[in-house]
Image (cartoon, rainbow, N blue to C red):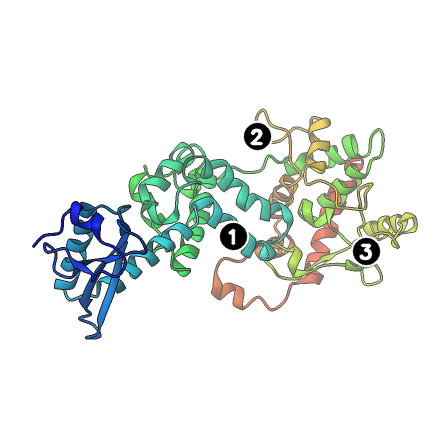
Amino acid sequence: MMLTDAKARKVTLGDKPVSDGSVRGLYLFPGRSAGKAKWVFRFVSPETGRRRDMGLGSYPATPLKEAREKGFQARRVLENGKDPLNERQRLLQIEKHKMSLPTFAEAARKVHEDLKAGFRNVKHANQWINTLEQYVFPSIGCIKVSTLSPADFAFALRPIWLEKPETASRVKQRCDAVMNWCAAHGYIMASPVGAVSQLLPKQPGKRERVANQPSVPWQDVPAVVQGVLRQGLQTRSKLMLEILILTATRSGEVRLMEWQELDLEKAIWTLPAQRMKAKLVHRVPLSPYLIDLFENLKEEADTGRTELVFPSRNNTPVSDMTLTKCLRDHKVASDTPGRCATAHGFRSSFRDWASENGYPRDLAERALARTIRNATEAAYHRTDLLKQRRDMMLAWEAWVLKAEER
């Protein structure tokens, strides 16, 4: 005989559990007062062979119709050879796991925290997360990582895919790093970012993308030194630019130079590996002119407050735009129409001078401390050819500083 609402409302404390009659195993157990009861699905677990009771809610909060639907579902699970209680627990765990899944933005920030210590400087660390904040977070940052597809990342990257291919490639790599981290933590099965390229147009090749730094033609470098850097008010920026030109080093290598790196007796400036792009120690030969220059600077330096050779007013490194701004302020022309020269461009000036004056490629490349991409070739680079480079750098200095004699 089937249970009705009228009968259910009459169940009181002390009564025996009432069988529903329509779903085998579904019972209404009396509560502490009339009309109050609880639904229980009683079954024998196919996994353990033991009898188990599965609560399906209280009555009348869970009405008869709803209890029967829950009972039917539990019976179906049972007929498929599974324990309904265990299955419900498993589903609850899945839901709980889903609730704990991070959004893409949350995951990206955690990955950034993990990676931060490995970046060369704060600027590069900030760039990593800033590009994601700018190009990816607005469209998919608030979406759970488990629901993201290749199409979602393609949608985020499309606006910059062809317009800014270098940036787009970096952002794509960073997205992939985030999603691989999610896969490693069990949030997803695998990163979907690898398939993004199949959904977007083909990017221009690397040769088509290369945008050289605007540089001063090597023939004009002496005129820039004499006509700009040595004219008017003598500033720290002008002095740093002169050192950068004579040593063919990078802006950051000059800006972060420390006194402990300079051995003025041996005439060598040794840059530690952590400050070099190639992550290798680089030695720069110093000329007598440069040694005199550094000796004069050291007499005025407050080494008790900072080791930096060119500190800012706060004894911190000067901005990475300081040198290029100096060139812009003086409107120093470059070989790129409509653009002023950049500090980094003087490395190209030196490289062209070396080539046109017959210096071996290997010697010039070592002077620039460029990364050797060929692994076999790199393995045989056991010497930095300091003596030969010293002769070359003295010749470069002679060209740069004696324009008035020609």
Residue 189 visible? no
Report the residue marked by disc 3. Answer: 259
Q: Earlier in the sequence, mark 3 or mark 1?
A: 1
Residue at the bottom extreme, as displayed: 49
Which SS class for mark 3? helix
Mark 2 vs mark 3: give the one in front.
Answer: 3
Q: Earlier in the sequence, mark 2 or mark 1?
A: 1
Classify 19 as above or below 235. Answer: below
Q: In the picture, residue 196 is in which quadrant?
A: top left
Task: Please state which amino acid type lies under the numbered disc 2.
Answer: Thr
Report the residue marked by disc 1. Answer: 110
Task: Please state which amino acid type lies under the numbered disc 1.
Answer: Lys
Q: Earlier in the sequence, mark 2 or mark 3?
A: 3
| Residue 336: image tag | 2
Mark 3 vs mark 1: give the one in front.
Answer: 1
- Residue 352, x across and y down, in percent: 60, 43
Query: Count of labels shown?
Result: 3
Q: CA distance from mark 2 to mark 1?
A: 41 Å
- Residue 46, x across and y down, in percent: 17, 71
